[in-house]
Image: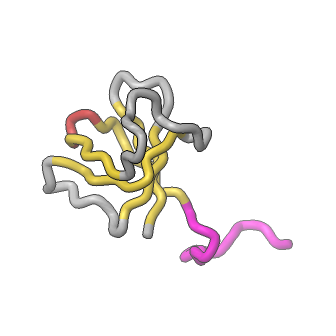
Amino acid sequence: MYTLLLHIADSPEPVKAEVDELPDPSASFLVIKNPRLRSEKEIRGLEDGVTMLIYPWWRINYIQVLPSGDDELDFPLLYRD
C-alpha cells in the first residue's frame, strides 16, 4: 500500500490518501482510499462515511509518493551517522 499526496487543481491544500498500487498514467482516473487533508483533517464537502474518491487525471497537477516506515533507501547517503 502506498500513501500519496495529491495536488489538485484549484485546491488550497493537497489531499492525502492510500492506494494499493501506484497509479497507471494511461488510466483516465485515479481511485484513492481514506481521503483526508495533508493535516489529517476531514475534507469539507464529503458525505459522512465516504472512504473512496475517484479523481479524473485532468484535475491532478502532480502526485507525491510519501515514504513508509519500512522503505529502504536504494541509494547510499552522502553523510555518515
At 43% from the left and 70% from the top, the residue drawn is 1
Q: Nearer the viewer, residue 24 or 34?
A: 34
| Image spot of residue 30 (x, y percent) | 25, 51
Query: What is the number of callouts on the image?
Result: 0
The percent coordinates of residue 79 (x first, y second) are: 78, 67
Residue 11 location in percent, x, y?
A: 41, 25
Q: Who's the residue at 30% across and 38% down the image?
A: 60
Q: Is residue 74 above or below residue 58?
A: below
Closer to the camera in the image, 49 or 64 = 49
Q: Which range is magenta?
A: 67-81
Give the colouring mode of the picture: secondary structure
Q: In the picture, which quadrant includes the C terminus?
A: bottom right
Relative image position of residue 16 (x, y in whole percent) = 48, 46
28 left or right of 1 in image: left
The stretch drawn in magenta includes residue 10: no
Main secondary structure found in the magenta portion: loop
Depicted 47 relative to depicted 64: above or below: above
View extreme (right): residue: 81
From the viewer's perspective, tell me whether residue 8 is left or right of residue 13: left
Q: For the point 33% across and 68% down, which residue is it?
A: 21
In the rendered view, tell whether residue 71 sits above or below residue 61. Answer: below
Identify the residue shown where x is 26% and y is 42%: 55
Magenta stretch: includes residue 69:
yes
Decide if residue 23 is on the left or right side of residue 1: left
* Residue at the limit of the structure toward the front, as seen here: 48
Of residue 39 and residue 42, the one placed in the foreground of this image is: 42
Q: Quadrant of residue 80?
A: bottom right
